[in-house]
Image (spheres, rainbow, N blue to C red):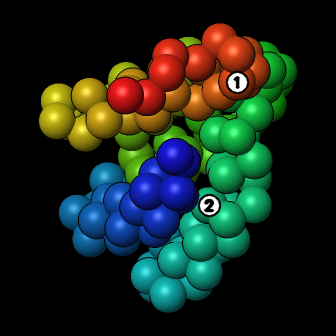
Amino acid sequence: MDLPYVLALPTYAATAWYHHKLPNQPAALEPLLKEVENFALTDYSQALAAGSSLSAERKTEIATRLHAYTGLAPTTSSAPICASMAENSKKLCWEAIRRRDASTRGLRDRPSIR
């Protein structure tokens, strides 16, 4: 269930813009949000869906863009944004990564839902 992360990214970007935490602070918020929304709905959602099959180069590209949009330290771990999140958000992020990675192994490898 990656949709919450895709939908939350523009909010993270707006918050970082407001607090002047972006590495290249744009003057206006509106153009930034349009760019971030496009990234979230395309490249970012595709990267999240790819999970552990994402290439190292693509992980670096996505982590770099996340850094530009959120000000969070870039990382190329299996969860590019999780490592820099606040503790409560980090827990949810890692949980989503585990579920996504489980789904890439196939349905028969998933634990049954009771």
Instruction: Report the side of 54 relative to 95 (left or right).
Output: right
Q: Position of residue 8 (x, y in %)?
A: 41, 61
- Which residue is identified by label 2? 40
Say which residue appears at 46% left-offset and 52% top-offset: 5
Instruction: Report the side of 41 relative to 31 (left or right).
Output: right
Say which residue appears at 51% left-offset and 27% top-offset: 99
Task: Give the quarter of the figure containing the C terminus.
Answer: top left
Disc number at residue 45? none
Q: Which residue type does callout 2 highlight? A: Ala
Q: Position of residue 111 (x, y in %)?
A: 50, 16
Secondary structure of the residue carrying tag 2 is: helix
Please say if 62 is above or below 10.
above
Please say if 108 is above or below 71.
above
Q: Which residue is most to the top? A: 109
Could you say which is closer to the camera, residue 57 or residue 71?
57
Residue 76 seen in the figure? no
Q: Which residue type does callout 1 highlight? A: Leu
Dot in front, 1 or 2: 1
Mark 2 Cα shell of 10 Å, populated few (<14), some (14-19), many (≥20): many
- Which residue is identified by label 1? 107
Alpha carbon separation for disc pair 1 and 2: 27 Å
Q: Position of residue 28 (x, y in %)?
A: 46, 84
Q: Position of residue 54 (x, y in %)?
A: 78, 25
Secondary structure of the residue carrying tag 1 is: helix
Mark 1 Cα shell of 10 Å, populated few (<14), some (14-19), many (≥20): few
Residue 108 seen in the figure? yes
Could you say which is closer to the camera, residue 25 or residue 33?
33
